[in-house]
Each structure stands twice: as structure tokens, then as C-alpha cells.
Image (tube, rainbow, N blue to C red):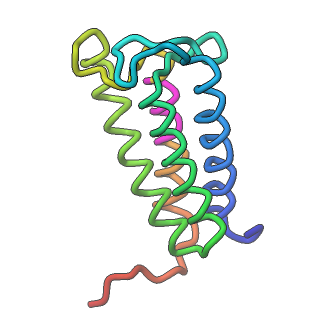
Amino acid sequence: MRTSPNRLIATVFGAVYVLVGLLGFAVTGGVGFIATQGELLLGIFEVNPLHNVAHLLIGAALLIAGLSNVTAAKATNSTIGAVYLLLGIVGFFIASTSLNILALNTADHFLHLASAIVLLGVGLTADKMVRSHATA
């Protein structure tokens, strides 16, 4: 794992997102599962129970991929990075609407964009010698 940036990033981000998902449940007691407004985690990130579950699932996917192999880590980093890029952008437009089922706030948008940059950056540029699943 130490020789693969993709495996390292996937494992570290996975562990962090699982921890964030678990910590989120400590602050969201009494918040509706898909409430458009949640409680603050770490005093800045707004979360609701669905947001916590999403963090747990994303963290688990990254952790499993990071502990598996380079190909899985590369694919997972790229895929989750792309999803976070989309969520980071779309989040700015849905934050004050009924579509905000993850109770996103501005801090969340910037964190999702930062995560996207790291995950996509590593997923698309590191471990170039690894063959993809696609065959010609």
C-alpha cells in the first residue's frame, strides 16, 4: 500500500469518512432522516442521518478498495471523486431548496470539492502503470 498513492489515499480518506459518518450520528439525534436542515458536525458541517449513512458507505467503499488492490483503489478514487465534484457544484444550487436531502451547507460544498480534487487528481494521474479493466 505504501507504494501506491491510490491505495494510500483511498485508505486514509475511507477511514476519515467512516469516522465522520459515525461522529455524525452523535449530533443528529432527533433530526429527520432526510431533513433539509441538520445539525452541525465539528461546528461547521451540517449533517442529517442520510448524510451520515452516505459518509459511511463512501468511507467503506474507499477503505475496502484501498485495502484491496491498486486497480480497485484507482477506480474507486476516480468514481467517488467525480461524484463529489458533481455534488460540490450542484450543492450550491440546491442548498436552500427541498432537494437538499443531505442537509448540505457551504462548508460541505467546499469540503466535497476539495475531496473531489484530491480523489480525482490521484485517481486519474497516479499509478499510471496499472492496466484498466477495459480491453481493446
Residue at the farthest bottom position: 136
Residue drawn at (66%, 68%), measured in percent from left and top? 67
The answer to whether residue 80 is above or below residue 85 is below
Residue at image point 44% right, 48% down:
81
Q: Is residue 112 magenta?
A: yes
Which corner quadrant holds the C terminus?
Answer: bottom left
Q: Is residue 83 above or below residue 104?
A: below
Total marks placed: 0
**Which quadrant, please, contains the N terminus?**
bottom right
- Which segment did they paint magenta? 109-116
Q: Residue furthest right?
A: 2
* Residue 19 location, quadrant: top right
User: Where residue 123 sits: x, y (%)?
Assistant: 50, 60
Residue 73 found in image quarter:
bottom right
In the image, 121 versus 70, the foreground residue is 70
x and y, in percent, of residue 63 in the image:
62, 58
118 sits to left or right of 101? right
The rendered magenta stretch, by its main secondary structure, is classed as: helix
Residue 4: image location, x then y, percent: 67, 69
Q: In this picture, is 41 found above or below 60? A: above
Identify which residue is drawn at 60% across, 41% down: 17
Which residue occupies the extreme front position in the image?
Answer: 30
Image: 89 above or below 135:
above
Q: Residue at x 46, y 51 (%)?
A: 120
Magenta region includes residue 42: no
- Left or right of residue 135, residue 64 in this image: right
